[in-house]
């Protein structure tokens, strides 16, 4: 696996956002600024690439304190820049696997020891309103270091 620089990360993210029926509904510039650049700048991402380096999936996450996590889960609002690393609670912010490979991405996250004991996230309707809250308990190891890279999907 190789490190992904900011420009490659933005390119991969744009490719995946364009392939996602849900994400394509949002204006690209503000979405990139609020939802993609913060995790890319903090190394809180993982891309899944085909052998030809075409992006197949992406996961971004934040480490929230309990109060911020509770507010996000209730209101479905976007994270503020200072909230991406404000506590110990793992929150999956974006999970994009538009090519039907979501199970492979989940399996990889579990097998690499990334997922902590408790993980939260939200799913939204196409209009951005809250669809459901996901709270999962996982019996796996500690999260990896801060810099993430790509994973080749075979």
Image (cartoon, rainbow, N blue to C red):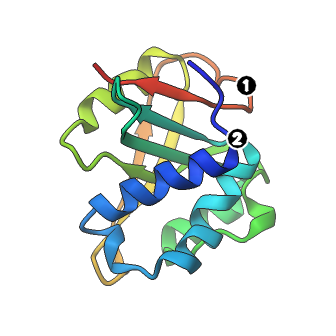
* Residue carrying label 1: 145
Residue 125 in the image, given as x and y percentages of width and height: 28, 75
Name the residue at 53% across, 73% down.
31
Where residue 35 sits, quadrant-wise, is bottom right
Point 54% across, 48% down: residue: 60
Residue drawn at (65%, 42%) of the image? 44
Which image quadrant: the C terminus?
Answer: top left
Which element carries disc 2, helix, strand or loop?
loop
Residue 53 vertical placement versus 78 (above, below): above
- Crowd around label 2: few <14 · some 14–19 · many ≥20 (10 Å): many
Q: Is residue 31 placed above or below 152 in the rendered structure?
A: below
Which quarter of the image is occupied by the N terminus? top right
**What label does residue 45 carry, if any?**
none
Q: Answer with mark 1 or mark 2, whichever residue precedes in sequence.
A: 2
Q: Is residue 37 left or right of residue 77?
A: right
Asked if the residue under mark 2 is in contact with the one under mark 1, i.e. CB atoms within 8 Å, the reply is yes
Q: Position of residue 24 (x, y in %)?
A: 33, 72
The answer to whether residue 23 is above or below residue 99 is below
Nearest the viewer among 123 and 6 is: 6
Q: Which residue is mark 2?
A: 43
Q: Residue furthest left?
A: 100
Q: From the top left corner, tell me how far across and down residue 79 is, in percent.
A: 65, 68
């Amino acid at each position: 696996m190789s490190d992904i620089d900011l420009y490659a990360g933005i390119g991969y993210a744009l490719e995946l956002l364009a392939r996602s029926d849900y994400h394509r509904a949002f204006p690209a510039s503000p979405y990139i600024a609020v939802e993609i650049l913060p995790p890319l700048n903090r190394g809180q991402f993982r891309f899944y690439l085909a052998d030809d380096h075409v992006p197949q999936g992406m996961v971004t996450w934040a480490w929230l304190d309990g109060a911020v996590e509770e507010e996000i889960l209730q209101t479905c609002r976007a994270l503020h820049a200072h909230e991406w690393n404000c506590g110990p609670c793992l929150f999956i912010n974006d999970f994009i696997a538009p090519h039907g490979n979501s199970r492979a991405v989940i399996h990889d996250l579990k097998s690499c020891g990334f997922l902590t004991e408790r993980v939260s996230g939200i799913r939204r309707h196409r209009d951005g309103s809250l669809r459901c809250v996901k709270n999962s308990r996982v019996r796996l190891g500690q999260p990896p270091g801060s810099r993430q890279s790509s994973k080749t999907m075979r």
